[in-house]
Image (spheres, helix red, strand yellow):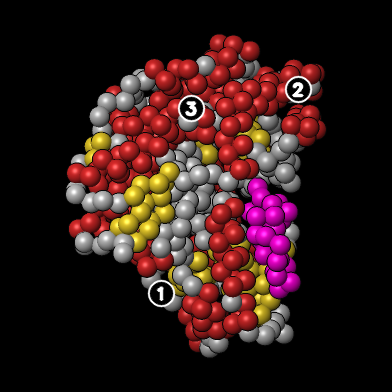
Amino acid sequence: MGSQLDLRYNANIPSEYAKLWNQIAHETHKPFTILIDSLSKQHGKSIDWWVSSPASRNTLTSPLFHYCCCIAFLQELIRKKEPISEIITDSRAFKKIIGDYLVGQGIAAKITLARLPLRQHLKEILRPIYVLFGIPFRHLILFIIAKITKYLRKPFPSNPLTLIDTFVMPNYIEKDRYYPGLMNALSEKEKETVWFVPHLYGFRPWQYRSVIKQLRRSKRNFALKEDYLKFRDYLFAWGHVLRIRTLRIKACLFRGVNISSLVREEMRSFKAISSSYTPLLNYRFARRLKEANIKLRLVVDWFENQNIDKGWNAGFRRYYQETPTIGYQGFAATPHYLCMYPTKVEQKNSVIPHKVTVIGKGLITLARKFCPDLCVTVAPAFRFQQVWQERKHLPTSSEYTVLVALPIMVSDAIHILTMLAHDKANLNNHVRLWIKPHPATPPSVIKKNFGADWPKEFEFVNGEFNDYIEKSNLLISSASSVCLETLAKGIPVIVVGNRHGLTHNPIPENIIEDIWQLCHTPEEIAKAIQFYKNRSQEKIKEHEKIGRRIRQEYFEPVTRDGVRRFLRLREEKYETNY
């Protein structure tokens, strides 16, 4: 009797295969990137290709990497002669590909296309309506509100501008989450020429009017894309759903298997198309600025190299060819977050910035993972300047406090909480659990997805991460740069591994000391908590010393000189060897 494998996107891999799965995923990074580069060579002149889901290589939203890992995983099981009775998938293209492959291997396994629950099935039926009309309608609401509130718009100064791409979320309108401290290094005259271009995230349409008014009246300078976009730009973005179907995908092989139908399936799926509107509007925004004769001296992108970034960079590289562009990678990513690492083909096709900046010298080599000659330098770690500040708080001596920092992906957050809830008795007495949601995910969403039995031991906290981590003895998290930030303070970290899929560990491989542990089971978590709870004073001092070393390697201090170098405000000419 063979095993049943659930290979749906975001499904649970059997725990006995978790180690093999993660090993295969690491080995798949390079061949998968080569595969996408080969497709990009065919469509390098098409902005519709670059803003598509497959071209993004965003492993958190695009299922293509997952299916490539599935192919490699099945080939390894076949090599080991592991019996397979049934494979469950949620992709029609993958079902046919695997069916044909197994027949060719002489393996008789049942391939089942999973049936969606009724609620999910209805969502899929309605998704085309939402993508074709709902998302464009939200963009048009912003467009109309911008026109209505145009009387509040600040005029641009006559001097060339520095444009900085940023995100605005609830509670982070006036407060800068992404570049805190940047403006403090500038003179009043220089501040007049620095303008932030916001992307709204986490707001409901009925909140747009209030948010836009707050941005217009902010002390910071905000340049709204909607002030320059025209109605035909929205039609252009809407036309992507038709244009993407005209791109021909030739046969492309991954480990000897033709996956071209998988690529086509993802490109044309309405779920993937939904993420292409904003990138295309970013692309047209650059064009409209040029047509309005807006002079730019520098363009900065919050650079994760997702499709939203490719639209932004393709636009400014095309319409402002003489203006330097910088991609700021303001956090430490996990190795599986492949879009973070640019490729030679992306460089050649000018869909990435001239120059990439990272927040610590220890991250330079990683940024060049797929593009060895990429221009990479170090910039201030704006979001993490607290690691250099004197500690203001200390944990209470009466309780051992564990801060649980939840990642942005709700599924990852629920996995961590489920692990803790499963064996909370082993956490022992006198252990306090603080739950810190990601700013983009309200506690109500976490509770709703967790289920009915919310443990009374889970206490939500709201406020600055730095204040809570300083009051804590230990951090538990995953897939978040707060893990590395916490280590830089000398505070130990438990990274929760995924027993049923990819483990997103943001801690660089060369940090091998016992200041952090990777745990895959509730029992391992409880054991690790006890290990850190029982640290001797000597061990605590050792971990503080390790933290200082991590701080030096991965977090560039925010200094006036560093900020001015980053924004090219020094007297010497900008480097010409982009």
- Distance CA(mark 2)–CA(mark 3): 23 Å
In three-dimensional space, the C-alpha distance between marks 1 and 2, rounded to whole angstroms, equals 53 Å
Task: From the top left corner, tell me how far across and down residue 120 is, in percent.
Answer: 59, 42
Q: Along the polypeptide, which appears first: circle 2 or circle 3? A: 2
Whether residue 212 is situated above or below residue 475 in the rendered picture:
above
Q: Which mark is residue 530?
A: none
- Which quadrant would residue 285 be assigned to in this image? top right
- Closer to us: mark 1 or mark 2? 2
The residue under label 2 is: 145
Q: Residue at x 25, y 47 (%)?
A: 102
Relative placement, left or right, of 126 versus 567 is right
Q: Could you say which disc has been placed on residue 513 in the image?
A: 1
Residue in the foreground of this view, choosing between 299 and 200? 200
Does 447 lie within the magenta span? Answer: yes
Span shown in magenta: 435-459
**Identity, as a three-letter code, of the amino acid under mark 3:** Gly
Q: Which residue is mark 3?
A: 311
Count residues near mark 1 (Cα–Cα under 10 Å), then give few for <14, some for 14-19, many for 20+.
Answer: few
Marks 1/3 in contact by CB < 8 Å: the verdict is: no
Q: Earlier in the sequence, mark 1 or mark 3?
A: 3
Q: Tag 1: residue type?
A: Glu
Task: Give the CA separation, mark 1 to mark 3.
Answer: 40 Å
Q: Residue at x 59, y 66 (%)?
A: 418
